[in-house]
Image (spheres, helix red, strand yellow):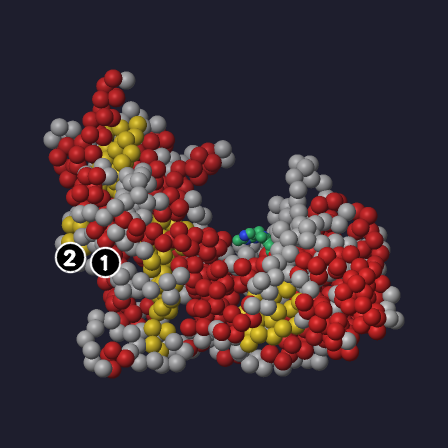
Amino acid sequence: MTQPQAVPDIAALKAVEERLRWLSAWTIHHANHVRDHADGLKVGGHQASCASMTAIMAALYFHALGPNDRVAVKPHAGPVLHAIHYLLGIQSREALENFRGLGGAQSYPSRTKDRIPVDFSTGSVGLGVAITAFASLVQDWLSAKGMMAEEERGRFVALVGDAELDEGNIYEALIEGAKHDVRNLWWIVDYNRQSLDATSADRMFERFDEIFRACGWRVVELRYGKRLSTALDAHPAVREWLEALPNAEHSALTYQGGGAWRSRMVADLGASAEPFLADRDDAQLAALMADLGGHCMETLTQAFDECSADDVPTMFIAWTVKGFGLPFAGHKDNHAGLMNPTQLAAFAEQMGVAPGTEWEPLGPLGGNARAGVEALLAAARIAREKRPRSFGRLTVPPIPAPSGEEQSTQAAFGRILLDLAKSGHPLADRILTTSPDVTVSTNLGAFVNQRGLFRRQDLADAFAQAKIPSAQKWGMMPSGQHVELGIAENNLFLMLAAAGLAGDLFSERLVPIGTLYDPFIARGLDALNYACYQDARFLLVATPSGITLGPEGGAHQSINPPLIALGQPGLRHYEPAFADELALFIGEAFRLIDLPEGESTYLRLSTRNLRQPQRSDELWKGDALAGGYWLREPAAGAEAAIVAMGAVMPEALAAHEELSADLPGLGLLNITSPDLLHRGWSASQAARWHGRNEPSHAERLLAWLPAHAGLVTMCDAAPASLSWLGGVRGQRVAPLGVDRFGQTGSLADLYANYRLDGTAITEAIAGLLLAEAKG
Ligand SMILES: Cc1ncc(C[n+]2csc(CCOP(=O)(O)OP(=O)(O)O)c2C)c(N)n1
Ligand SMILES: [Mg+2]
């Protein structure tokens, strides 16, 4: 896997760095100052954040990276990534001219929206860093099973902002990675000591290395470039002074330039500064003081070469200047700073770019310099073309519903996975299960007993060896399929994101299944959104859910996840009431994982045992997959219907039976996915504007009832999950659901308390009919 490194052509790499610095700054400038934007909205971009990284990225992409290596680029250095691909001939001038415009290069690198190969989308800081650890773990999982050849393995690199290091999810991933002995990771910190608002706090300064070392990482600090390092070696007093300088002052002096450095050194060091300052004019002094490790090509290439031979996870702390070489270098307000046209013109002149040649990839380079750069571009080993996505590899076996008169969806889930594990079907070998310390309590245990826990080296189950009876086999092995995580839900979603991108990253589609308690989805919400944004494909099983958890605890009762799912693109919510529905949805979720136009699935399950329905046909299935079906069909002209979802179905059925005596023809609509119904409803309205007039599934279902009919919607979740159904045909709604924080209690007590019982349904229907009579 490790690549023999060519001797770096430092001059050519420096020339590439200058091209990247120019092109990234120009792309942003063009979007803000040259292109028309009639709406007057700020376009923005981060010239300073880019300039801080151009040397690091030149050294990486044109020297250190191998063809299998994958990189998560700090979001605000996106223009540098585009500039790299522009030099390589993969990015078009048109896309750069349209930077941050519709269809143009995206503000932040996007796997799905950019035309260049983006290994990991970034944007929400911290997540791009952490996902590399999980991608590396997935690589180990695949190769331990012979699904990946040794020579296909790569390294996972994250380019990290120093303020990004404040994101807690990085440390959750660091800890999880250490437990799994994760390797082949490079996290390269652009240590410019500036954040968005200001300069970074000094107190954490030089502490990060200790944290990483404690987790088994190698830390390589690239503090000074060769020239500055040599100069400081000769002047230890200056070195000592410089190293005691607070971040804010260092940045301010960098911004002020050589004259300020000089007077400050004289003021602080007196005569001992003189030998250091002699023979250097202000411009030379400023350049010397900015010769930090992250800008020195010799330092960078040497450090990368030295760490290329092994797979030890490595943190590089590359000291840099934010806005290196730009007029606002070091200024604390430079994060979103843009050069004005005059400054840009001066910068262009300094970079040798003649007016009218701004988009020339190699610009002013001539003669030997051009030849050297062309040779570098030709030799760049990182994959250059966007890889095709890998779909259509899985055959989904039939998923039979577990038998049993009374079942909970959670228990049925465990049995379905167990049956799959035992079936020997090839799909089962591609299932990667994962859970943040709730494997047993979410019923994944039986699958894990069959298929084992993943670990690169065997680790026997000490309890089993000692013959202590236990329902759980906890043996770990390379062939194990379950990745047990610590209790950090962010990590669960990052793991699902990485495994859900296995088809794209490693050309091996996996079936990732993650379980957690429904309320804790909120804990990892940004990471879940991040996974969906990248179009990672997985199955998320959330259980237990709602107040139906009963005595097990108010704090664990989830209320709003169906609403979260309703607003989350790329994630389909199904909430089955019965085991056969669940089996249907699991099969569908597997198909969706492997379809180009598919998506991920979220199943909201319950621990409540429900009497299973007797089915006389399979007609319900199509409707259930589309979001809902009539469990009890209404009679023509029925005045009302109960519209219920999930675990509260027994109350709905009982109320239906009781009320039918007085209200013959009362319907009971079983909602299996408010998410799909809503999507279909709004999509069909949009389609009408394009001349297509197809009623949505929600419209078709509700068209069984007259427009004046009333709906009692009920779910063990926020009532708004279903109450919107009244808007579909203008039918009146009495919404039942949970709109207060829950508490412990027996189901009967809780349902009565939260108005999810038969009495509440009867009252709600009476209210609707009364209102209709009055109206
Ligand atoms: C989760 C999240 N919070 C806030 C932001 C807004 N933001 C973008 S960059 C940034 C500061 C980054 O500083 P640093 O990581 O040091 O990067 P630099 O630009 O200095 O290289 C912030 C707060 C974000 N993108 N993501
Ligand atoms: Mg910074």
Three-letter code for the amino acid on which mark 1 is drawn: Ala
Would residue 434 be found to the left or right of residue 398 on screen?
right
Identify the residue under disc 2.
404
x and y percentages locating residue 755 in the rendered image: 22, 37
Image quarter of the C terminus: top left
Which mark sits nearer the N-terminus, 2 or 1? Answer: 2
Image quarter of the N terminus: bottom right
Q: From this view, report whether residue 621 is shown above or below residue 224.
A: above
Residue displayed at 48% across by 70% down: 136
Q: CA distance from mark 2 to mark 1?
A: 9 Å
User: Which sits in the foreground, 241 or 620?
Assistant: 241
Residue displayed at 56% across by 68% down: 207
**Tag 2 and tag 1, C-beta contact below 8 Å:** yes
Q: From this view, report whether residue 122 is shown above or below residue 661.
A: below
Residue displayed at 36% across by 47% down: 561
Q: From this view, report whether residue 704 is shown above or below residue 316.
A: above
Three-letter code for the amino acid on which mark 2 is drawn: Gly
Identify the residue under disc 1.
412
